[in-house]
Image (cartoon, grey):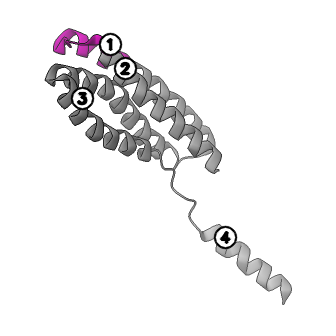
Amino acid sequence: MAQERVGEKAVQAAHKTPPRPQYLRTTLIQLMLLFAVAPITYSAAGLASAVSLACGAMCAMVPQAYFAVRLTAAAKRSAHQAARLGLAAEGGKFVLSASMFALVFAVVKPASPGLVFAGFAVFWIVQVVDGIRLLRAR
């Protein structure tokens, strides 16, 4: 009788789906932060500064969103495939970040380059802090 209960619990545990990784949560946090900071920057320093800050933030947010989507898809695979896809996603994130910086400085030509880098740094720190939170939650 006791063995049946243990067996039933094992079967029920095996049929439960593992919790979905919350990689896109970081991107949503960054988006909310951008919607909070951009109007403040606009009212305090003007449109050119707000655009510069938003460009820097987007240089961090778009690659993070790409990474999150790729990693979410990789989590459904085997451990070996997930590791390979995760590494490829990280490389893609790096290339996308560099490309976005090049586009910002070539096309947008921000009025405040310091704010572009400050926006990137703040939003990158959000990624790091939320990544540490994800690691500790497991």
Q: Mark 1 points at which residue?
A: 114
> What's the CA distance linking mark 4 and mark 1?
52 Å
**Magenta span: chief secondary structure:** helix
Which secondary structure, mark 2? helix
**Callout 3 amino acid:** Thr
Q: Which of 77 and 33 is in front in this view?
A: 33
Please tell me which of labels 4 and 3 falls first in the chain. 4
Graded by Cα atoms within 10 Å as few (under 14), some (14 to 19) or many (20 or more), the crowding at tag 3 reads some
Would you say 101 lies left or right of 45 here?
right
Above or below, 75 relative to 59: below
Task: First in sequence, mark 4 or 1: give its number.
Answer: 4
Q: What residue type is labelled 4?
A: Ala
Q: Is residue 17 visible?
A: yes
Circles 1 and 2: CB distance less than 8 Å?
yes
Residue designated by label 2:
118
Which stretch is magenta? Answer: 96-114
Instruction: Give the mark nearest the N terminus, 2 or 3.
Output: 3
Residue 64 forms part of the magenta stretch: no
Tell me the residue that label 4 is attached to.
13
**Which callout, 3 or 1, points to the residue nearer the camera?**
3
**Residue beneath label 3, please?**
41
Distance of label 3 from label 1 (alpha carbons): 14 Å
Q: Nearer the viewer, residue 39 or 21?
A: 39
50 or 72, which is in the foreground? Answer: 50
Q: Which of marks 2 and 4 is in front?
A: 2
Give how far across and how far down residue 15 sits, in percent. Answer: 61, 70
Quote the CA–CA distance across marks 4 and 3. 50 Å
Amino acid marked by disc 1? Gly
Vertical placement of residue 29 versus 37, above or below: below
